[in-house]
Amino acid sequence: MSDLISTPTFDVGCFPGLRDAMSPGGTSTLELQEVADDVAAEQETLPVSEAATDVDELGPEFAQLQATLLEASKGVTDGTDMEYKRLMQQCEAFLVSMGLLRNGEVFFCRTPRREVPTFIVAWIMNTCSKAAFC
């Protein structure tokens, strides 16, 4: 398996669900722009700076995000927690199978990569292209 490139080329054609959602066939230009805007907006919400190597360097916005998530997660049951972990493992396995993540590399962490929103969208769209419920 090839090594992960630090900034992988993201080929939408490799992800049928995402490709179908973004294909001009049944999608208007406005809808395509909305998808692109959503992905860009998600990337902007990541509290990661290029130089950040420690959680303390991420600033007060990251600390506030952590506090908010901690408060929101107080009502999460053990079953829900196990389901989240199962979905996280599925996402990581998908990313490994697509060559976007090395086997054993941690994807969900305190200092996320810049591509996290795009990779998660690709995983969701790929999953949805195989299921009738999406």
Image: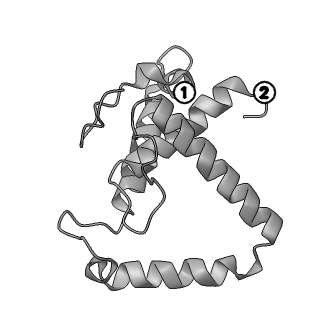
**Front in this rendered view, residue 59 or 90:** 90
Q: Earlier in the sequence, mark 1 or mark 2?
A: 1
Q: Are marks 1 and 2 in contact (CB under 8 Å)?
A: no
Q: Residue at x 28, y 30 (%)?
A: 9
Query: Does residue 102 appear left or right of residue 80 in this picture?
Result: left
Residue corresponding to mark 2: 132
Q: Relative to residue 51, is residue 108 drawn left or right?
A: right
Three-letter amino acid code of the residue under disc 1? Ala
Identify the residue at image location x=47%, y=78%.
65
Q: Residue at x 30, y 83 (%)?
A: 56
Q: What colour scheme was applied to this rendering of the protein?
A: one colour
Q: Closer to the camera, 49 or 103? A: 103
The answer to whether residue 96 is visible is: yes
Q: Which residue is mark 1?
A: 21
In the rendered view, tell whether residue 39 sits above or below residue 106.
Answer: above
Disc 1 packing (10 Å; few <14; some 14–19; many ≥20): some
Which quadrant holds the C terminus? top right
Query: Where does residue 71 sit, x and y in percent of width and height?
Result: 63, 84
Crowdedness near tag 2: few (<14), some (14–19) or many (≥20) residues, C-alpha within 10 Å = few
Q: Amino acid at mark 2?
A: Ala
